[in-house]
Image (spheres, helix red, strand yellow):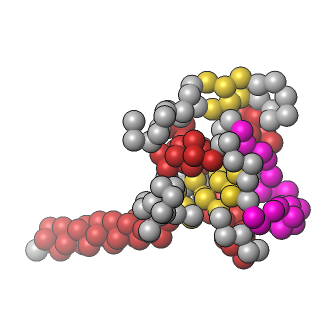
Amino acid sequence: MKIRTKSIGVLALAFLVAAAVNGCWATQSAGELGEADNGMPHYGVIISQQTVDVILGLQEDPEFVLLDIRTPAEVEAGHISGAVNLDFHDPAFRDDLAALDRDKVYLIYCRTGNRSGQAYSIMKELGFERVYDMGGGIMQWIAAGYPVCIGQLNAEHSCSGELPKSSDT
């Protein structure tokens, strides 16, 4: 009888963990995997493969800003080509966000998606409407095999790899 009770308890625990994980993922990606009428993902949390589509689709648009919100040391250790930096841990971070042009399109990322999720919420509070948040951060980007650049943003640095033509390839 104890074995059966223990098995039911383990199954119940596994179910609760699965439900919690599924709930967390659902809140980060609900409705975000679809595309808007222009073929781009909907604004909000996107996965690294959708990030490729956004970067390729908007890289020539002067209204597009790729915003890395990690510390300068983290950025120097590896960033996405074309990024600009605002340090999430800087006391002036919220004010720096508030000073940004609300008419531009932003794609924000951090290391794992935690800071960018918080920054995304702040940007929504501040009235930004066209913001993508790269869920999973640069760690997921790197795990997917996408290119990174090493070095300071405003200095000569090296980049490895190339973006695929689209995330479908």
**96 or 22, nearer to the observer:** 96
Look at the picture and state if 48 lies above or below 94: above
Q: What stretch is highlighted in magenta?
A: 82-103
Residue for point 35% across, 70% down: 19
Magenta part mainly helix, strand or loop? loop
Q: How many labels does the image show?
A: 0
Q: Quadrant for residue 22, please give it.
A: bottom left
Which residue is outermost to the front?
Answer: 38
Which residue sits at x=61%, y=59%? 132
**33 to the left or right of 122:** left
Q: In which quarter of the image is residue 102?
A: bottom right
Q: Is residue 148 magenta?
A: no
Where residue 64 sits: x, y (%)?
Answer: 70, 51
User: Would you say residue 65 is visible in this rendering?
Assistant: no
Quarter occupied by the C terminus? top left
Residue at 47% x, 70% y: name it: 27
Residue 161 falls left or right of residue 126: left
Q: Examine the rendered structure and indicate whether residue 126 appears above or below residue 76.
A: below
Give the image quarter of residue 18. bottom left
At which x and y percent is residue 7? 18, 67
Horizontal side, residue 36 vs residue 89: left or right: left
